[in-house]
Image (cartoon, rainbow, N blue to C red):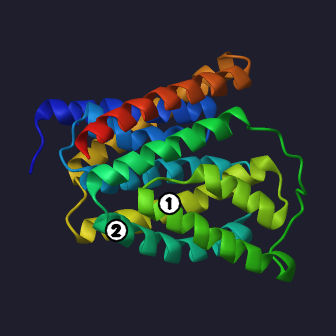
Amino acid sequence: MALEPIQYLLGAFSGALVGFVLGLVGGGGSILAVPLMVYLVRVPQPHVAIGTSALAVAANAAMGLVSHHRIGNVKWRCAALFAVAGIVGAAIGSTLGKAFDGQKLLFLFALVMIVVGVLMLRRRAHTGNAGVRLGRDNALKLLLFGFGAGLFSGFFGIGGGFLIVPGLIAATGMPMLNAVGSSLVAVTAFGLTTAANYALSGLVDWPLAGLFIAGGFLGSMAGTRAAKRLSGGGHLSTVFAALIFLVAAYMLWKTGLAV
C-alpha cells in the first residue's frame, strides 16, 4: 500500500535526523530508524518499517565504511570472517522476526533501545592492539561472536553496531577505532541480508528507503561537521542516551496499549 506524499517527506527528514545523529555521536544512531518509521512516518506495518529501515541502515553503514577504509581503520580479514558468520545469523534472525507479532516485536525493540542507552552511557576508551591479524587464536571467536550479533541484528532489523563493536574487541583485542571502522562491514552485510529477507516477503518500501538513504547522506555530513565544532563528546553521548530512553518509554507505552 503506497504512502501519502507527506509520509515520504517525513521519511527523508527521518533519514536526515538519523544521519545527523550518527555523524554527531557515532554508533548507535541507527537505533532510531525503526521508531521514526513507525511513529513519525507512520508506516502502517511494523514489519515494513523494520525491513525498510534495515536497507537504509545498510546503505548508511556502507557510506561510513568508505570513509573509514580511506583512513585505514578497517581490519578487513577479521571483519569479513565476522560478517560471513553474521550473515547466517541475520538470515535466521530476520526469518524469525518476520514470523513474530509486529507489536510484540516493537515492544522487545524498545527494551533493546534501553540497553543501547545504557551502553552509550558506559562507553569507555579502549587501547587494544593495532597490529592484530586474523589467525587461529581469534578465528573461532570471530565466528561465534559474528553469528550471535547477526542473529540479534536480523531479528530486530537493526545495524547492531553496539553489539558488533564489543564483539570484535572481545574476539581480537583490536583498538576501539579499528573496531568501529571494521564493524561497518558487518552492519552493511547484516542490514542487506535482513532487507533481502524482508523484500522476498514484500516487506520493503523501496521509494521510502531511497528517500531515507538520501536524507541520511545529507544528515551525516551535517552531523560530522557539527561534531568537529562541538566539544565534550561524552556530553553528546549522554544527551543521545537520554533521547533513546525517552523514545523507548514512548514505544513501551504505545505497544503496551496495543498488545
In the rendered image, the vertical position of residue 76 relative to residue 55, given as above or below: below
Q: Amino acid at mark 2?
A: Ala
Please give left or right for residue 23 compared with residue 168 in the image.
left
Kindly identify which residue carries mark 2: 196
In the rendered image, the vertical position of residue 104 relative to residue 119, given as above or below: below
Q: Amino acid at mark 1?
A: Ser
The answer, for residue 29, to whether it is visible in the render is: yes
Where's residue 81, x and y in %? 66, 75
Residue found farthest to the top: 230
Circle 1: is it few (<14), some (14-19), or many (20+) Cα within 10 Å?
many
Please give left or right for residue 67 compared with residue 251 in the image.
right
- Secondary structure, mark 2, is helix
Where's residue 65, x and y in %? 59, 52
Number of labels in the image equals 2
Where's residue 129, x and y in %? 90, 57
Circle 2: is it few (<14), some (14-19), or many (20+) Cα within 10 Å?
many
Kindly identify which residue carries mark 1: 153
- Secondary structure, mark 1, is helix
Where's residue 12, x and y in %? 30, 34
In the rendered image, the vertical position of residue 195 relative to residue 251, given as above or below: below
Q: Residue at x 72, y 25 (%)?
A: 234
The answer, for residue 222, to whether it is visible in the render is: no
Residue placed most toward the observer, 160 or 245: 245
Q: Sequence-wise, which precedes: disc 1 or disc 2?
A: 1
Residue placed most toward the observer, 234 or 177: 234
Q: Residue at x 43, y 48 (%)?
A: 109
Q: Residue at x 51, y 68 (%)?
A: 151
Instruction: Give how far apart the Cα atoms at labels 1 and 2 are.
Output: 14 Å
Q: Residue at x 28, y 59 (%)?
A: 101
Residue placed most toward the observer, 32 or 55: 32
